[in-house]
Image (tube, rainbow, N blue to C red):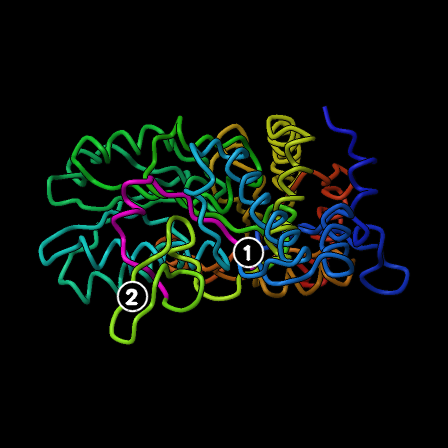
């Protein structure tokens, strides 16, 4: 469905060498994706011909910058089918989304004795802000466990979601297992007990269609740098009535309506949450990335990744001593986390890097998940719209050499 050769030509870095004579094979997309030429060019064009501060100037450059900046917000709103662009709050990254909701909504709504429900497979970004909030407010944290196959064990969800549950926050797709969770089912379960539901979409929005109205979630957050956009830009989608009731996250310029020496009133949505000069060019870059992905079709991207993931899981399973974590390809996104008996994941990553292959090794900001597995780290290959079966083959060849080096 996708012309992979044509797509790869859009990514200049994919034609480079990791070392002299060693072509780069980039399999670390779950950490951060590479950027296509249209995104790079849009950001360069902005700096060369349109840069000015937004919202504050009457001159043409400022008006042009504002139109580009707010136009990018409208593109993102359409991309996730938000009812209105005013429900799209610009952030630095998805981590800031959790912190904003914890600080603003959480401190106004969570009380002693309340419960916050998370899952055992969460990224630290969807753990630590709630830990801080729970400790401050005297609330309790509860967790949906994951099963041996890396899927959520929902058998006791009815016992975990109670009238005490004020917030249910979970990942749409695990950054370690790759598990695609049943988001709509979980949202409905949370709403059934009156909980506010937040979705970590950092690994799902870049790789598959996401419709916030169909999901009916209250908050959803994701990062631009994982979806062909630049670093330093992220998104928080929120239900309007919740955003309107929430106090500001940061104070300063642009988030105000009127300022007096002793008090202030706040700007409309979404600017109430966007204090100071924003990440203008980064937002424009993300808007262009959204155009790029939408033009290819998110269904097509997801189908390609499932094909590559299935191919990779089968190929990796032929490496002696390998353990692959998570469900089968039909239940996961483009992630393959694995270990090789007798070799530390850091050694795996270092050795395959000598063959020009970029993978990730460590706990992937999911230390509790690895602790439950009884391991300190995994190696992780992660795929995207430009990944080829040939690249997977090169990874497997390199892993065979790793075993030879360790004389396994």
Q: Is residue 335 above or below residue 189?
A: below
For the point 43% across and 63% down, the residue is: 275
Q: From the viewer's perspective, tell me whether residue 388 is left or right of residue 234.
A: right
Residue 270 spot, x, y in % from top left: 41, 49
Q: Is residue 238 magenta?
A: yes
Q: Quadrant of residue 136?
A: bottom left
Residue 83 spot, x, y in % from top left: 42, 32
Magenta-tinted stretch: 232-250
Q: Which mark is residue 199?
A: none
Residue under pointer 2: 264
Q: Are marks 2 and 1 in contact (CB under 8 Å)?
A: no
Q: Residue furthest right?
A: 21
For the point 79% across and 50% down, the residue is: 14
Q: Nearer the viewer, residue 184 or 273?
A: 273
Q: From the viewer's perspective, tell me whether residue 188 is left or right of residue 267.
A: left
Q: Is residue 350 above or below residue 374?
A: below
Residue under pointer 1: 233
Q: Is residue 347 magenta?
A: no
- First in residue order: circle 2 vs circle 1: 1
> Do we see residue 356 in this rendering?
yes
Q: Quadrant of residue 312?
A: top right
Q: CA distance from mark 2 to mark 1?
A: 27 Å
Residue 53 spot, x, y in % from top left: 60, 63
């Amino acid at each position: 469905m996708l012309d992979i050769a044509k797509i790869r030509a859009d990514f200049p870095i994919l034609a480079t060498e990791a070392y002299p004579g060693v072509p780069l094979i980039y399999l670390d997309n779950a950490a951060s994706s590479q950027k296509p030429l249209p995104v790079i060019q849009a950001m360069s064009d902005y700096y060369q011909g349109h840069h000015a501060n937004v919202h504050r100037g009457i001159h043409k450059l400022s008006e042009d910058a504002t139109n580009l900046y707010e136009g990018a917000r409208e593109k993102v709103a359409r991309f996730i089918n938000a009812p209105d662009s005013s429900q799209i709050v610009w952030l630095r990254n998805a981590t800031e989304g959790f912190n904003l909701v914890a600080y603003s909504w959480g401190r106004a709504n969570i009380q002693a004795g309340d419960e916050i429900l998370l899952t055992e497979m969460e990224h630290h970004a969807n753990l630590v802000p709630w830990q801080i909030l729970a400790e401050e407010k005297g609330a309790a944290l509860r967790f949906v466990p994951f099963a041996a196959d890396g899927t959520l064990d929902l058998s006791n969800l009815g016992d975990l979601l109670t009238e005490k549950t004020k917030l249910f926050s979970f990942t749409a797709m695990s950054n370690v297992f790759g598990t695609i969770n049943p988001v709509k089912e979980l949202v409905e379960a949370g709403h059934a007990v009156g909980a506010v539901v937040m979705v970590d979409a950092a690994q799902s929005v870049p790789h598959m269609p996401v419709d916030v109205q169909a999901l009916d979630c209250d908050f959803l957050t994701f990062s631009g740098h994982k979806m062909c956009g630049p670093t330093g830009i992220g998104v928080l989608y929120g239900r309007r009535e919740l955003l309107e009731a929430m106090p500001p996250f940061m104070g300063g310029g642009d988030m105000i309506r009127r300022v007096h020496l002793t008090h202030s009133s706040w700007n409309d949505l979404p600017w109430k949450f966007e204090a100071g000069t924003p990440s203008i060019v980064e937002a424009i870059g993300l808007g262009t990335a959204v155009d790029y992905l939408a033009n290819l079709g998110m269904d097509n991207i997801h189908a390609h990744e499932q094909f590559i993931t299935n191919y990779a899981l089968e190929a990796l399973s032929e490496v002696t001593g390998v353990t692959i974590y998570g469900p089968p390809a039909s239940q996961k996104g483009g992630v393959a986390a694995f270990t090789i008996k007798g070799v530390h994941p850091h050694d795996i990553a270092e050795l395959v890097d000598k063959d020009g292959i970029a993978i990730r090794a460590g706990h992937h900001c999911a230390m509790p998940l690895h602790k439950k597995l009884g391991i300190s780290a995994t190696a992780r290959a992660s795929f995207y719209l430009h990944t080829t079966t040939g690249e997977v083959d090169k990874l497997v060849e390199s892993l065979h050499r790793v075993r030879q080096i360790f004389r396994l």
